Image: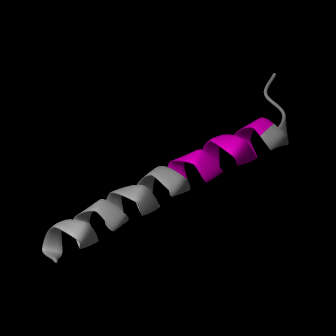
Amino acid sequence: MVGPTAVDAAERQELAAKLAEKDKEMERMR
């Protein structure tokens, strides 16, 4: 069974990936 901390870390990683993608898009817009 997966603990809540593991799920938390996975969710944080997903959010970080989404933020990184947004940052790349912003760089492209410039």
Q: How is the image coloured?
A: one colour
* Residue located at (26% from left, 72% from top): 26
Nearer to me, 18 or 28: 28
* Residue located at (46% from left, 50% from top): 17
Up the image or down, 3 lies above or below 20; here it is above
| Quarter the N terminus occupies | top right
Nearer to me, 24 or 2: 24
Up the image or down, 4 lies above or below 23; here it is above
* Residue located at (82% from left, 42% from top): 5
Q: Is 18 on the left-hand or right-hand side of 4?
A: left
Residue 7 drawn in magenta: yes
Across and down, in percent, residue 3 comes to: 84, 34
Q: Residue most toward the top?
A: 1
Q: Is 27 on the left-hand or right-hand side of 18?
A: left
* Residue located at (44% from left, 62% from top): 19
Across and down, in percent, residue 25 comes to: 24, 65
Q: Quadrant of residue 9?
A: top right
How many numbered tags mark residues here?
0
| Quarter the C terminus occupies | bottom left
Q: Is 9 on the left-hand or right-hand side of 2?
A: left
Across and down, in percent, residue 27 comes to: 24, 69
Q: Quadrant of residue 28?
A: bottom left
Span highlighted in magenta in the image: 6-14
